[in-house]
Image (spheres, rainbow, N blue to C red):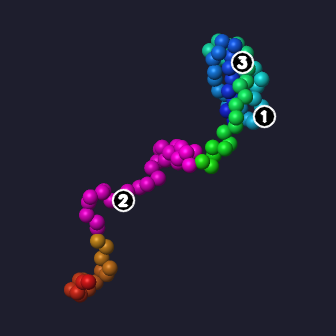
């Protein structure tokens, strides 16, 4: 799908999505119903690799579900994992 821009004789701009190559020549304007002319615009292909586009893309992806999951509340003490479950090992000297 591609987004096509149109402008009606009254000057209203609107966009419609259609499969590439199948855009209608004169769709009716949503405001007044008059047949509208297509506005030729530059394709947005050059933006796909830019850092700005990647930021927008990742923002949209993480809108419903965050990418970063914090397992510990900042400022709370870290839980120390014991190296051994044997109680006698706790008596050994620590570094
Ligand atoms: Zn119109």
On the image, the x and y values in percent for residue 52 come to: 55, 45
- Up the image or down, 70 lies above or below 83; here it is above
Which residue sits at x=23%, y=87%? 92
Camera-side residue: 42 or 31? 42
Task: Say how many tags the image has.
Answer: 3
Q: Is mark 3 within 8 Å of ligand 1?
A: yes
Q: CA distance from mark 2 to mark 1?
A: 49 Å
Query: According to the image, label 2 marks what residue?
Result: 71
Q: Earlier in the sequence, mark 2 or mark 1?
A: 1
Q: Is 92 left or right of 11, judged from the image as shown? A: left
Query: According to the image, label 1 marks what residue?
Result: 21
Quadrant including the C terminus: bottom left
Q: Mark 3, residues whose alpha carbon is within 10 Å: few (<14), some, or many (≥20)?
A: many
- Up the image or down, 34 lies above or below 93; here it is above
On the image, the x and y values in percent for residue 49 come to: 62, 49
Circle number at residue 36: 3
On the image, the x and y values in percent for residue 34 come to: 70, 13
Camera-side residue: 40 or 72? 40
Label 1: state its secondary structure: loop
User: Which image quarter: residue 84?
Assistant: bottom left
Give the main secondary structure of the magenta stretch. loop
- Up the image or down, 91 lies above or below 60; here it is below
Which residue sits at x=30%, y=76%? 82
* Magenta range: 51-79
Q: Is 45 left or right of 70, judged from the image as shown? A: right
Q: Mark 1, residues whose alpha carbon is within 10 Å: few (<14), some, or many (≥20)?
A: few
- Up the image or down, 75 lies above or below 33; here it is below
């Amino acid at each position: 799908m591609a987004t096509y821009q149109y402008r009606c004789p009254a000057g209203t701009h609107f966009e419609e999505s259609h499969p590439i190559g199948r855009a209608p020549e004169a769709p009716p304007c949503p405001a007044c119903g008059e047949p509208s002319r297509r506005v030729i615009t530059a394709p947005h292909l050059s933006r796909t690799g830019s850092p700005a586009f990647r930021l927008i893309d990742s923002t949209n992806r993480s809108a419903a579900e965050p990418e970063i999951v914090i397992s510990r509340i900042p400022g709370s003490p870290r839980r120390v994992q014991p190296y051994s479950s044997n109680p006698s090992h706790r008596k050994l000297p620590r570094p």
